[in-house]
Image (spheres, rainbow, N blue to C red):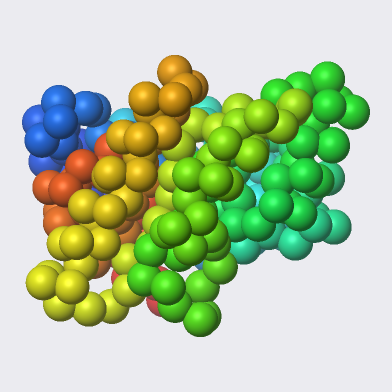
Amino acid sequence: MTNEIERRVAALLKTLEGGNPFGEKITLVAATKTRTAEEINRAICAGITDVGENRVQEFCLKYGDVHGGRRHFIGHLQLNKVKYLVGKVCLFQSVDRDGLAAEIARLSLRAGLVSDILIQINIGREATKGGYLPAEGMDAFRRLAATEGLRVKGFMAMLPRAGEDELLPLCDGMRALYERAKEVSPDVEFLSMGMSGDFPLCISRGANMIRLGTAVFGERT
Protein backbone atom coordinates (compact mmCIF):
# COMPACT_ATOMS: atom_id res chain seq x y z
CA MET A 1 0.00 0.00 0.00
CA THR A 2 1.49 3.30 -1.11
CA ASN A 3 0.28 5.18 1.98
CA GLU A 4 1.45 2.60 4.51
CA ILE A 5 4.24 4.75 6.01
CA GLU A 6 1.91 7.72 6.32
CA ARG A 7 -0.75 5.56 7.98
CA ARG A 8 1.73 4.11 10.44
CA VAL A 9 3.16 7.51 11.37
CA ALA A 10 -0.29 9.03 11.90
CA ALA A 11 -1.33 6.14 14.16
CA LEU A 12 1.89 6.32 16.18
CA LEU A 13 1.72 10.07 16.69
CA LYS A 14 -1.89 9.71 17.81
CA THR A 15 -0.87 7.00 20.29
CA LEU A 16 1.92 9.17 21.70
CA GLU A 17 -0.19 12.29 22.18
CA GLY A 18 -0.73 11.59 25.87
CA GLY A 19 2.97 11.54 26.70
CA ASN A 20 4.35 9.39 29.52
CA PRO A 21 3.13 9.05 33.14
CA PHE A 22 5.49 11.85 34.18
CA GLY A 23 3.72 14.34 31.94
CA GLU A 24 6.57 14.46 29.41
CA LYS A 25 6.20 14.63 25.65
CA ILE A 26 7.43 11.57 23.74
CA THR A 27 9.97 12.21 20.97
CA LEU A 28 9.65 9.61 18.23
CA VAL A 29 12.93 8.95 16.40
CA ALA A 30 12.46 6.99 13.18
CA ALA A 31 15.21 4.36 12.97
CA THR A 32 16.17 4.44 9.31
CA LYS A 33 18.63 1.56 8.94
CA THR A 34 18.34 0.16 5.35
CA ARG A 35 15.52 2.59 4.54
CA THR A 36 15.73 4.73 1.41
CA ALA A 37 15.81 8.50 1.41
CA GLU A 38 12.41 8.43 -0.30
CA GLU A 39 10.92 6.40 2.54
CA ILE A 40 12.48 8.68 5.15
CA ASN A 41 11.19 11.79 3.41
CA ARG A 42 7.70 10.32 3.33
CA ALA A 43 7.88 9.70 7.07
CA ILE A 44 9.06 13.29 7.65
CA CYS A 45 6.23 14.68 5.52
CA ALA A 46 3.82 12.57 7.60
CA GLY A 47 5.01 14.19 10.82
CA ILE A 48 8.27 12.55 11.90
CA THR A 49 10.60 15.21 13.32
CA ASP A 50 13.67 13.11 14.21
CA VAL A 51 15.50 10.38 12.30
CA GLY A 52 18.27 8.09 13.50
CA GLU A 53 20.89 6.13 11.56
CA ASN A 54 22.85 3.11 12.81
CA ARG A 55 25.66 3.15 10.27
CA VAL A 56 27.99 5.97 9.32
CA GLN A 57 28.18 4.97 5.65
CA GLU A 58 24.38 5.03 5.34
CA PHE A 59 24.21 8.34 7.19
CA CYS A 60 26.65 9.95 4.74
CA LEU A 61 25.03 8.46 1.64
CA LYS A 62 21.54 9.66 2.58
CA TYR A 63 22.46 12.93 4.27
CA GLY A 64 21.93 15.28 1.33
CA ASP A 65 18.83 13.47 0.07
CA VAL A 66 16.85 13.57 3.33
CA HIS A 67 14.97 16.83 3.69
CA GLY A 68 14.14 18.09 7.15
CA GLY A 69 14.20 16.20 10.41
CA ARG A 70 16.76 16.35 13.20
CA ARG A 71 19.50 13.77 12.63
CA HIS A 72 20.51 11.34 15.36
CA PHE A 73 23.18 8.66 15.37
CA ILE A 74 21.94 5.58 17.24
CA GLY A 75 24.39 2.80 16.39
CA HIS A 76 27.81 1.64 17.55
CA LEU A 77 30.37 4.24 16.51
CA GLN A 78 34.04 3.65 15.77
CA LEU A 79 36.49 6.41 16.67
CA ASN A 80 37.74 6.86 13.11
CA LYS A 81 34.19 7.54 11.88
CA VAL A 82 33.34 10.35 14.30
CA LYS A 83 34.80 12.95 11.91
CA TYR A 84 32.02 12.25 9.41
CA LEU A 85 29.27 13.06 11.90
CA VAL A 86 30.35 16.01 14.05
CA GLY A 87 28.42 19.08 12.99
CA LYS A 88 25.79 17.02 11.18
CA VAL A 89 24.32 15.01 14.06
CA CYS A 90 22.06 16.79 16.53
CA LEU A 91 22.28 13.97 19.09
CA PHE A 92 24.82 11.16 19.49
CA GLN A 93 22.66 8.59 21.28
CA SER A 94 25.14 5.74 21.60
CA VAL A 95 28.08 7.15 23.55
CA ASP A 96 29.12 3.92 25.22
CA ARG A 97 32.70 4.57 26.38
CA ASP A 98 35.01 7.35 27.51
CA GLY A 99 37.23 7.11 24.44
CA LEU A 100 34.32 7.80 22.11
CA ALA A 101 33.16 10.73 24.23
CA ALA A 102 36.68 12.16 24.16
CA GLU A 103 36.89 11.94 20.36
CA ILE A 104 33.49 13.59 19.88
CA ALA A 105 34.59 16.34 22.28
CA ARG A 106 37.94 16.84 20.53
CA LEU A 107 36.44 17.16 17.06
CA SER A 108 33.60 19.31 18.32
CA LEU A 109 35.98 21.77 19.92
CA ARG A 110 38.08 21.85 16.77
CA ALA A 111 34.95 22.78 14.83
CA GLY A 112 33.88 25.35 17.40
CA LEU A 113 30.86 23.27 18.42
CA VAL A 114 29.29 21.63 21.43
CA SER A 115 27.84 18.20 20.63
CA ASP A 116 24.77 16.85 22.39
CA ILE A 117 25.11 13.25 23.55
CA LEU A 118 23.27 10.52 25.41
CA ILE A 119 25.16 8.09 27.60
CA GLN A 120 24.44 4.50 26.62
CA ILE A 121 23.73 2.21 29.57
CA ASN A 122 23.96 -1.56 29.23
CA ILE A 123 20.90 -1.98 31.40
CA GLY A 124 20.69 -5.74 30.91
CA ARG A 125 24.43 -6.24 31.48
CA GLU A 126 24.59 -8.13 28.17
CA ALA A 127 27.98 -9.21 26.86
CA THR A 128 26.87 -8.56 23.26
CA LYS A 129 25.97 -4.91 23.87
CA GLY A 130 28.09 -1.87 24.59
CA GLY A 131 27.51 0.76 27.21
CA TYR A 132 28.32 1.63 30.78
CA LEU A 133 27.04 -0.70 33.47
CA PRO A 134 24.13 0.71 35.48
CA ALA A 135 26.30 1.13 38.58
CA GLU A 136 28.71 3.27 36.52
CA GLY A 137 26.00 5.52 35.13
CA MET A 138 26.23 8.49 37.50
CA ASP A 139 30.02 8.50 37.56
CA ALA A 140 30.04 8.46 33.75
CA PHE A 141 27.47 11.23 33.70
CA ARG A 142 29.47 13.50 36.00
CA ARG A 143 32.66 12.82 34.06
CA LEU A 144 31.22 13.43 30.60
CA ALA A 145 29.06 16.37 31.67
CA ALA A 146 32.27 18.08 32.80
CA THR A 147 33.95 17.49 29.42
CA GLU A 148 34.35 20.60 27.30
CA GLY A 149 32.75 20.19 23.90
CA LEU A 150 29.98 17.88 25.15
CA ARG A 151 26.51 18.51 26.49
CA VAL A 152 24.98 15.42 28.12
CA LYS A 153 21.25 15.40 27.40
CA GLY A 154 20.43 12.13 29.18
CA PHE A 155 20.66 8.39 28.70
CA MET A 156 19.94 5.69 26.13
CA ALA A 157 19.28 2.01 26.73
CA MET A 158 18.28 -1.11 24.80
CA LEU A 159 16.28 -3.65 26.73
CA PRO A 160 17.20 -7.33 26.56
CA ARG A 161 14.76 -9.87 25.23
CA ALA A 162 12.99 -10.99 28.38
CA GLY A 163 9.62 -11.19 30.04
CA GLU A 164 7.84 -8.19 31.48
CA ASP A 165 8.62 -9.18 35.07
CA GLU A 166 12.33 -8.91 34.27
CA LEU A 167 12.05 -5.78 32.14
CA LEU A 168 10.03 -3.60 34.52
CA PRO A 169 12.76 -3.22 37.16
CA LEU A 170 15.32 -2.50 34.41
CA CYS A 171 13.12 0.30 33.05
CA ASP A 172 12.58 1.63 36.56
CA GLY A 173 16.33 1.60 37.13
CA MET A 174 16.88 3.68 34.00
CA ARG A 175 14.24 6.17 35.05
CA ALA A 176 15.80 6.47 38.50
CA LEU A 177 19.21 7.15 36.91
CA TYR A 178 17.65 9.76 34.65
CA GLU A 179 15.99 11.47 37.63
CA ARG A 180 19.27 11.57 39.56
CA ALA A 181 21.09 13.16 36.62
CA LYS A 182 18.26 15.62 36.07
CA GLU A 183 18.68 16.85 39.63
CA VAL A 184 22.34 17.60 38.87
CA SER A 185 22.06 19.24 35.45
CA PRO A 186 19.37 21.29 33.68
CA ASP A 187 20.71 19.96 30.36
CA VAL A 188 19.24 16.50 31.02
CA GLU A 189 16.15 16.08 28.88
CA PHE A 190 15.94 12.63 27.32
CA LEU A 191 15.55 9.04 28.42
CA SER A 192 15.79 7.19 25.11
CA MET A 193 14.43 3.72 25.72
CA GLY A 194 12.04 1.70 23.58
CA MET A 195 12.03 0.11 20.15
CA SER A 196 9.26 -1.30 17.97
CA GLY A 197 8.77 -4.40 20.13
CA ASP A 198 8.82 -2.84 23.59
CA PHE A 199 8.09 0.89 23.37
CA PRO A 200 4.66 0.83 25.12
CA LEU A 201 6.27 -0.81 28.16
CA CYS A 202 9.16 1.68 28.13
CA ILE A 203 6.85 4.68 27.91
CA SER A 204 4.75 3.33 30.77
CA ARG A 205 7.88 3.37 32.96
CA GLY A 206 9.07 6.83 31.99
CA ALA A 207 10.84 6.80 28.62
CA ASN A 208 10.38 10.09 26.77
CA MET A 209 12.22 9.19 23.57
CA ILE A 210 11.72 6.02 21.51
CA ARG A 211 13.53 4.68 18.44
CA LEU A 212 11.18 2.91 16.03
CA GLY A 213 12.02 1.31 12.70
CA THR A 214 9.56 -1.46 11.86
CA ALA A 215 6.66 0.34 13.55
CA VAL A 216 7.23 3.30 11.21
CA PHE A 217 8.33 1.68 7.96
CA GLY A 218 7.07 -1.90 8.18
CA GLU A 219 9.15 -5.05 7.96
CA ARG A 220 12.43 -4.85 6.08
CA THR A 221 12.52 -6.59 2.73
Going 15% across and 36% down the picture, which residue do you hit?
20
Residue 49 in picture, x, y percent from top left: 40, 31
When the figure is inspected, residue 137 is found, relative to residue 160, above or below; the finding is above
Q: Quadrant of residue 201?
A: bottom left
Judged left or right of residue 13, residue 103 is right
The image shows residue 184 at horizontal and vertical percentages of 44, 25
User: In this picture, is 129 found above or below 179?
Assistant: below
Residue appearing at x 57%, y 36% in the figure:
142
The answer, for residue 81, to whether it is visible in the render is: yes
Q: Is residue 41 left or right of residue 98?
A: left
Q: Residue furthest right?
A: 110
Which quarter of the figure has residue 54?
Answer: bottom right
In the image shown, does 28 or 44 lie closer to the viewer?
Answer: 28
Which residue does the image show at 79% across and 31% down from the upper left? 108
Comparing 74 with 109, the one in front is 109
Q: Is residue 219 above or below residue 63?
A: below
Q: Is residue 216 above or below residue 23?
A: below
Quarter containing the C terminus:
bottom left
Q: Quadrant of residue 110?
A: top right
Residue 85: x and y in percent read 73, 43
Q: Quadrant of the N terminus?
A: bottom left
Residue 155 x, y percent position in the rendering: 44, 44
Camera sees residue 61: no
- Identify the residue shown where x is 31% and y is 59%: 195
Q: How many marks?
A: 0
